[in-house]
Amino acid sequence: MSRLLAFPAGRRAKWIVLVAWLIVLGAVGPFAGRLFGAADNDRLEYLPKSAESTEVLKAQEAFPQGQVIPAMIVYERDSGLTQADRQRAAADAQRLTREFAPQATPQTPQVSKDGKAMMFVVPLAATGDEQEGEVILDAVDGMRKRLGDGEGGLEIKVAGPAGMGADEFLIFRDMEFTLVLIPVVVVAILLLLIYRSPVLFLVPLFTVAAANQLGSAIVYGLIKGPGMVVNSMAVSVLSILIYGAGTDYALLLIARYREELTRHGDRHEAMAVALRRSGGAIIASAGTVGLGLLCLGVADLNSTRTLAPVGALGILSALVAMLTLLPALLLVFGRWIFWPRIPHQGDVHRASRAWTRVGELVAARARPVWITTAAVLAVGLLGLLSFHSPQQTRFTEKPDALKGQEIISAHFSAGAGNPADVIANADRAEQVKAAALAAGATSVQESGRVGGKVQMQVTLPAEPESSAERDAVERLRDRLHAVPGADARVGGPAAIEVDMVDTIARDSVLTIPLVLGVILLVLCALLRAITMSLLLIATVVLSFGAAMGISTAVFEHVFHWYGQDPQLPQIAFVFLVALGVDYNIFLVSRVREEAKRHGTRRGTINGLVSTGGVITSAGIVLAATFSVLITLPVVSFAAQGFVVALGVLIDTFIVRSLLVPALTHDLGDRLWWPSGLARGAVRAHSAPEPVAASERRR
């Protein structure tokens, strides 16, 4: 294994590696750029096959209009609608239906009881393929252009599922620029600040960009293969993971390479040692994150399950690039790449004063330090008391469709803009209608019959995306399922949300324990210490809870995002536990190396001081790359970015810098049970040696 890790450090091997990478990049380049365009956000592809709303979507394909996505055309005049307004709406209903939904019969606009608003529905046909988003966007955009902005105080909006879907698709389509360019800029700036070199930062930046090209091309190939569907969330996570994790691996390798250059006159020998000594920790780190992500593969929700191969392939691409292309490039450029601080053999390595002081604090007051930090994190858990779903705030800014929904909610039945779809046996249509009204529905409209089945649109008595809407869907299902011989099924956007939330809850019960178990096994195999592995797992779980709690409080009281995406805890847990253990692996691997020579307590302080700067830099880079998601106008994306970024910073500055070192120093050798270190094989840690002096002699 050591020889394989050191292969790129060979005098000839580095050129072989570079040529191989140039060939690979030339081959994958044309495909990598197509990934964002291949993302598919079709509703049917991301629901479990057993979900009731999935059955409705499939059943709708048999009707002439197929799956329907309603566009709600809404008019409002605060002073009251005029006769001209009503005539215009009637003409618009005829014109828009003929142009955008020729399979449907034009509706007569419905006027609100207060006479200030009216609306009608244009039932757009869903295509059921990856082009559906473009089709709906084009239709909604066309309707908005035909309608204009209104005049003389008349407001006109295109809302409903079609309007909301078009606004979301537009955001997803335009965010390729954000998710590709901004991470590059962020990483470039941070590397420039970290290295304070006008040239060195370009090497890891180019390497991580190459890794992103490779990962994007591989995922694109999977999408084009059978049975693989990837949505915009998975594509977004891919680039963020590669840039964040890849830069972290680069920082660790370059730091160790620079250290070895002060000990070796031959840079190839220095790189070989650096790869052998840091490569294991980097591989273990990547393996932990990759295996944690693969655990999502057991999820029933398709949008969650596809994160498993996408995320794992992203981590693998970053790992391969950093252990092959990066060392080869560094060797080709030679020592001068570190200019103006070029390392030479015999240079004195000085420990960071800041991290030396942190080490001295931990050594002198280990127990108070870990008790205090654990208590602070426990306080952060209190924010979880205010966590609730479903998510009610979907966008950080109000798109046109959301403004239209507000008009509907103000003047019509709360659920008028988000009707439920019902499929039932046609010979039980009247009983189904009666049952729907008995369940609280404000209106039931039949929209077609075919093959002995009837389709209906049911207006629910609840605000869209609220807990009341969930209750209304469940109540409607209970009533309709009880109709003898009706075989009634309830679907539509509200029912889809209910099915997704229920599926996520079931998936979380399965995936979260699985992630913990897999990561625990990886830690035990790496450290050969069960006690230490359990300790690290406990600290990152505490860190995750604190990050979620603080974030929940910020979302509600600072950002005013009401309700949370039900998928947020599950995805954030996987990322934060895997990435949190990541940094602890970097630290504890060095501590274990030092403990073999100096004992656990001395090794803990040496490991903390020697890795403090590079791991902190890595944490800042990873947090910054995930923060890119916060700039997106979709709350679910922004929330994921905020939670993960905050959690990474907590892991970096509190857990890895204070909590874990203090616990390790306080508990001592017993943490290495059942390895030989737990039996006190090394006792050098009792030597009264100052931290700073020890580090300066290394």
Image (tube, rainbow, N blue to C red):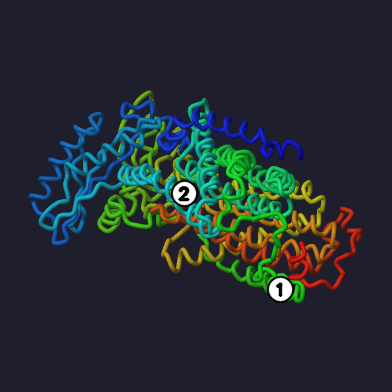
Q: Is residue 169 left or right of residue 609?
A: left
Seen at 51% across and 26% down, the residue is 225
Badge 1: residue crowd in 10 Å (few <14, some 14–19, many ≥20) = many
Q: Is residue 118 left or right of residue 534?
A: left
- Neighbour tally class for label 2: few under 14, some 14-19, many 20 plus, Cα within 10 Å: some
Q: Seen from this angle, which residue lies furthest left?
A: 84
Q: Give residue 239's position: percent from left, percent from top.
A: 50, 44
Q: Nearer the viewer, residue 233 or 615?
A: 615
Vertical order, 599 against 458 (above or below): below
- The residue lying toward the viewer, choosing from 110 and 265, is 265
Name the quadrant of the C terminus: bottom right
Question: How far across and down, in percent of the image, does residue 588 sit?
Answer: 74, 57
Q: Is residue 7 above or below residue 246?
A: above
Q: Please name the residue shown 71% across and 39% down the image.
A: 5
Measured in 3D between alpha carbons, the distance from the residue under mark 2 to the one under mark 1, in whole angstroms, is: 37 Å
Q: Under tag 1, what secondary structure?
A: helix
The label on residue 457 is none
Say whether marks 2 and 1 touch (CB < 8 Å).
no
Give the quadrant of residue 120: top left
The x, y position of residue 39, in whole percent, is 44, 36
Residue 502 in sight: no
Percent of width and height locating residue 590: 75, 56
The amino acid pointed to by label 1 is Val
From the viewer's perspective, tell me whether residue 265 is left or right of residue 123. right
Residue at numbered disc 1? 369
- In which quadrant is the N terminus drawn? top right
Q: Earlier in the sequence, mark 2 or mark 1?
A: 2
Q: Is residue 47 left or right of residue 279?
A: left
Which residue is label 2 attached to? 184
Can residue 449 be seen from the camera position used here? yes
Q: How many marks?
A: 2
**Amino acid type of disc 2?**
Val
